[in-house]
Image (cartoon, rainbow, N blue to C red):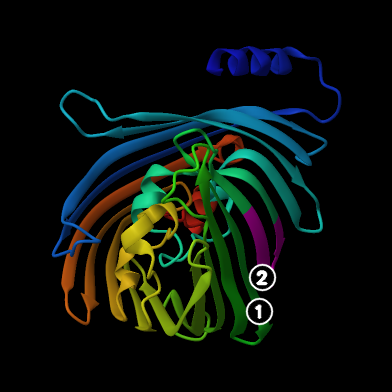
């Protein structure tokens, strides 16, 4: 498959221009060392240490209105014999409009999302190992906010494997002054395998999270300051029992950043968000297993050692606290990104230093 893709892409590159054609390319590289201590049976002590390289190349037509790109994601754990690696294909078409609409289909990188999914919907571990959305995404991006909806086909049904997909909706809009309204909706579906084993049943997981936030970034001496709060309404069902399990809670977040230092706090209180997690794990519930607890606090202290438009080198300390357990994580991460548009402005120091590269894990 990879050889066919390379041959097709090569032919496209040598076709004479049909419109305003341009070669598009990008290189996205990450290194991460994450040491996890003090977990429980759902968040065990473990260490992640890996590199991830995701080069892409393609074409754009009609002033970037139509973009076709392809590449690979090479995930390589730091193991002596270099085993355990994964090479995943990336190929997608993206349609861009001047009014802020974008539609993308194929195997597309999650970095095309405006923001990272919150961790109660998409855990750190899955962010490491599943860097692509396998499906379609539509986005409306404006200076005052954004809305995006995506469908991720996580697994196709085979005789042994169960069909699985996830639908996601994220939005955040400025209402008045520092006030913003937004939220997240996620539906996760785990169907049956082709074998239709007697103990298999279709499972559903629906999470609805309206949020209100206040962004005070331009009203203080800090580089950024934002508070948000909202409710989480979650519904889970094992269709073999034909009964919905209802659970709800409250979640608050706070983010403050000053120069190279950043503090993030997330607090959840309510019912167990993942009552079916012991049975199905991350096949159904995609969020951090810490939300299996009724009380949970996560505090991240992050040091941005190098931070600009094309690189973010950080060290962080994370404290997890539940009603009966504490966990402590230490992490060093680096993400490097460059593309053909940034390359054209590589001598513009102000441009390179004025932006910030977002981490997606």
The residue lying toward the viewer, choosing from 39 and 179, is 39
Mark 2 and mark 1: span between their CA atoms? 6 Å
Q: Which residue is mark 2?
A: 145
| Residue density around tag 1, few if under 14, some if 14–19, many if 20 or more, within 10 Å | some
Q: Mark 2 and mark 1 in contact? Answer it, CB < 8 Å.
A: yes
Q: In terms of depth relative to the viewer, which is nearer, 248 or 332? A: 248
Q: Residue at x 62, y 52 (%)?
A: 151
- In the image, residue 204 lies at what x, y percent? 53, 62
Quarter of the image that includes the C terminus: bottom left
Q: Nearer the viewer, residue 248 or 213?
A: 248
Instruction: Locate residue 301, reporting x and y percent.
Output: 27, 69
Identify the element where label 1 is drawn: strand
Residue at 17% over, 51% down = 46
Give residue 330's position: percent from left, percent from top.
19, 59
Query: From this viewpoint, is residue 221 visible?
Result: no
Q: Relative to 141, say whether 127 is above or below.
A: above
In magenta stretch: residue 178: no
Q: Residue at x 46, y 64 (%)?
A: 121
The answer to whether residue 331 is left or right of residue 148 is: left
The boundaries of the magenta stretch are 139-150
Residue 329 percent coordinates (x, y): 20, 61
Is residue 252 shown left or right of residue 43?
right
Secondary structure at badge 2 equals: strand
Q: Which mark is residue 174?
A: 1
């Amino acid at each position: 498959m990879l050889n066919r893709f390379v041959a097709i892409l090569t032919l496209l590159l040598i076709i004479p221009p049909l419109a305003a054609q341009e070669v598009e390319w990008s290189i996205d590289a990450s290194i991460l060392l994450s040491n996890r201590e003090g977990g429980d049976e759902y968040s065990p002590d473990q260490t992640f240490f890996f590199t991830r390289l995701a080069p892409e190349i393609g074409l754009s037509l009609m002033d970037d209105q139509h973009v076709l790109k392809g590449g690979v994601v090479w995930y390589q754990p730091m193991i002596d014999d270099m085993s355990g690696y994964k090479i995943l294909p990336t190929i997608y078409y993206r349609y861009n409009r001047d009014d802020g609409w974008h539609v993308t289909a194929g195997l597309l990188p999650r970095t095309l999302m405006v923001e990272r999914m919150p961790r109660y919907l998409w855990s750190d571990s899955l962010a490491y190992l599943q860097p692509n959305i396998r499906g379609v995404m539509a986005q409306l991006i404006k200076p005052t906010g954004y809305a995006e909806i995506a469908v991720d086909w996580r697994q196709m049904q085979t005789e042994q494997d169960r069909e699985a997909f996830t639908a996601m909706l994220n939005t955040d809009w400025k209402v008045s002054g520092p006030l913003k309204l937004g939220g997240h909706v996620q539906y996760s579906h785990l169907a049956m395998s082709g074998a239709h084993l007697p103990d298999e049943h279709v499972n559903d997981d629906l999470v609805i999270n309206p949020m209100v936030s206040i962004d005070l970034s331009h009203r203080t001496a800090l580089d950024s300051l934002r508070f948000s709060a909202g409710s989480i309404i979650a519904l889970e069902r094992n269709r073999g029992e034909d009964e919905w399990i209802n659970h709800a809670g409250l979640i608050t977040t706070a983010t403050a950043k000053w120069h190279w230092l950043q503090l993030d706090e997330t607090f959840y209180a309510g019912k167990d968000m993942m009552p079916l997690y012991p049975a199905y794990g991350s096949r159904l519930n995609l969020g951090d297993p810490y939300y299996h607890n009724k009380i949970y606090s996560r505090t991240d202290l992050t040091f941005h050692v190098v931070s600009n438009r094309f690189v973010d080198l950080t060290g962080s300390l994370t404290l997890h606290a539940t009603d009966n357990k504490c966990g402590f994580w230490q992490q060093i991460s680096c993400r490097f990104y460059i593309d053909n548009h940034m390359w054209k402005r590589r001598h513009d120091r102000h441009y390179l230093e004025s932006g910030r590269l977002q981490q997606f894990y």
